[in-house]
Structure formats: C-alpha cells, structure tokens
C-alpha cells in the first residue's frame, strides 16, 4: 500500500526557532512536494524536488528551504520560524510528470508558531 | 500563471441529492485535472484523474468531466450520503506542478 509519512502531526514552536519537517515515501517516487494549506487559500506549493539533491522553488518559497539527500526523504526547513508560518503543511510524492500519475499525500503537520 | 477557482466555497444538501462541484482554470495547457477529497485535519485522497486527452472519468457514484477549451471541470456525485461530507479540491497539473483550488466544503445532512 502506498505510503507517505510525516514526522509529526502537531508541532508548537516559538518565533525564531529553526524547525524541521520530515517527509518519507516508500513508493520509490522521483517527485516530492511541500505545500502549505491555509483557510480560503487552498494548497500553495512551497518547494518541490524531482530527484535527489535537486530542488525547485514553488509559489511561496520565502522563509523556507528544503533538503533531499535520499530519494525517499524530503525535508522542509523553517530557518527562523515566524507567526505567519503557522499553517498546515502537507507533503506529497508522485512518479514522473506528464503521465497519468497522481500525487500521494501525507497526513499533514499542523504547525503553530507562538 | 495557472489559477484554479472552485465555486461555491461551501455546499449543504440533504442525503440522496446529487452533488455538482465546479472547477475552473485559466491555462488550458494542462497534463491532467485531478479531484481530491480531504477530511477534516487529514491529508488529501485522490478521487479521479482526467488526462488532458480525455473528457470524463467515472468511479462508482463519482463522475468527473473536463472541457479544456472552456477551462472547466465538474465533479458529479450521485445519490449523496452523509459519508460524502468533506472538502473537495481540484488541481490542474501544468508542467509537473499542481495548482490547487481552495476547495468546496460539502455537508450532506441525513
């Protein structure tokens, strides 16, 4: 069964802290994605990666960085957390684009920055 | 830049009625159009994926249509049930990146 897991379901951090969100997929997918989801705004793409050590900026990369050292793992890093980064963070993975391939989503991490 | 809109933002229907959810997109150069379901506090689950060369896809009580020329997709859910209550999101896959709508929150009352 297809599986995308995220390291935490809920996180509470303080302003200025460095925050790591981890995502692991067991499907040998090339593509991995990080989104944030806010009420009324839908999902917005932060970063994505189509291969190990490769990354591309999405629509809202400011204040975030990513790391992909292994194919199955994609990490999102908040270098200095701010209150406007309080959100639901969703990770997803997929096979090659341009074909009939869906994205598989993890359960999400709800982050609260105080 | 691709923009995806879903109207209405929320919908409440009595059990047994058919549901019609709308999705519009601005750039017709898409690989595919996908519909997802999201339960409160959870991730997204794929419902249907329509390739750009197709006009519709069906799965059980769900049917999704795609009209690229007008930039529209519609998700039909027949004979709605309380278990269909969730938020439904559409996403347009353009050049390997998914652009999501904000979703339609559906409540089916018994």
Image (cartoon, coloured by chain):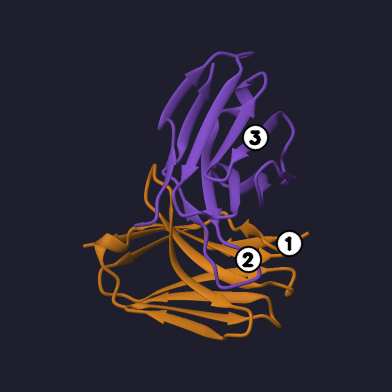
Chain identifier of the residue bearing label 2 in the image: B
**Pointers 1 and 3 in contact (C-beta within 8 Å):** no
Seen at 26% across and 74% down, the residue is B16
Whether callout 1 and callout 3 share a subunit is answered: no
User: Which of the labelled discs sits on residue B92, or is there none?
Assistant: 2
Vertical arrangement, residue B67 with respect to residue B29, above or below: below
User: For residue B46, what is the image quadrant?
Assistant: bottom left
Chain A tint as drawn: purple
Q: Secondary structure at mark 1?
A: loop
Chain identifier of the residue bearing label 3 in the image: A
* Residue at image mark 1: B2
User: Which of the labelled discs sits on residue A70, or is there none?
Assistant: none
Residue mark closest to the camera, 1 vs 3? 3
Chain identifier of the residue bearing label 1 in the image: B
Q: Secondary structure at mark 3?
A: strand
Indicate left or right for A13 with A77 as reference: left
Whichever of labels 2 and 1 marks the residue nearer the N terminus, that label is 1
Seen at 54% across and 77% down, the residue is B50
* Residue at image mark 3: A67
User: For residue B109, what is the image quadrant?
Assistant: bottom left
Chain B tint as drawn: orange
Label 2 to label 3: alpha-carbon separation: 26 Å
- At which x and y percent is residue B95? 72, 64
Q: Crowding near pointer 2: few (<14 within 10 Å), some, many (20+)?
A: many
């Amino acid at each position: 069964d297809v599986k995308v897991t995220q390291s935490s379901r809920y996180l509470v951090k303080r302003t200025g802290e460095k925050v790591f969100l981890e995502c692991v997929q067991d499907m040998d997918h090339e593509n991995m994605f990080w989104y944030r989801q806010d009420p009324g705004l839908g999902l917005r793409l932060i970063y994505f990666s189509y291969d190990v050590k490769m990354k591309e900026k999405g629509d809202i990369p400011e204040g975030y960085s990513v790391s992909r050292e292994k194919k199955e793992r994609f990490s999102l890093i908040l270098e200095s957390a701010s209150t406007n980064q309080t959100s639901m963070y969703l990770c997803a993975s997929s096979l090659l684009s341009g074909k009939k391939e869906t994205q598989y989503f993890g359960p999400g991490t709800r982050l609260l920055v105080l | 830049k691709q923009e995806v809109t879903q109207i209405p933002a929320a919908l409440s229907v009595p059990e047994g009625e058919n549901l019609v959810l709308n999705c519009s997109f601005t750039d017709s150069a898409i690989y595919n159009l996908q519909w997802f379901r999201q339960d409160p506090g959870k991730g997204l689950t794929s419902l249907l994926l329509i390739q750009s060369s197709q006009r519709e896809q069906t799965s059980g009580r769900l049917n999704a249509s795609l009209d690229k020329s007008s930039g529209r997709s519609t998700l039909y859910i027949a004979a709605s049930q309380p278990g269909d209550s969730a938020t439904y999101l559409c996403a347009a896959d353009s050049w390997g990146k998914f652009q999501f709508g904000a979703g339609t929150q559906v409540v089916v009352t018994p």
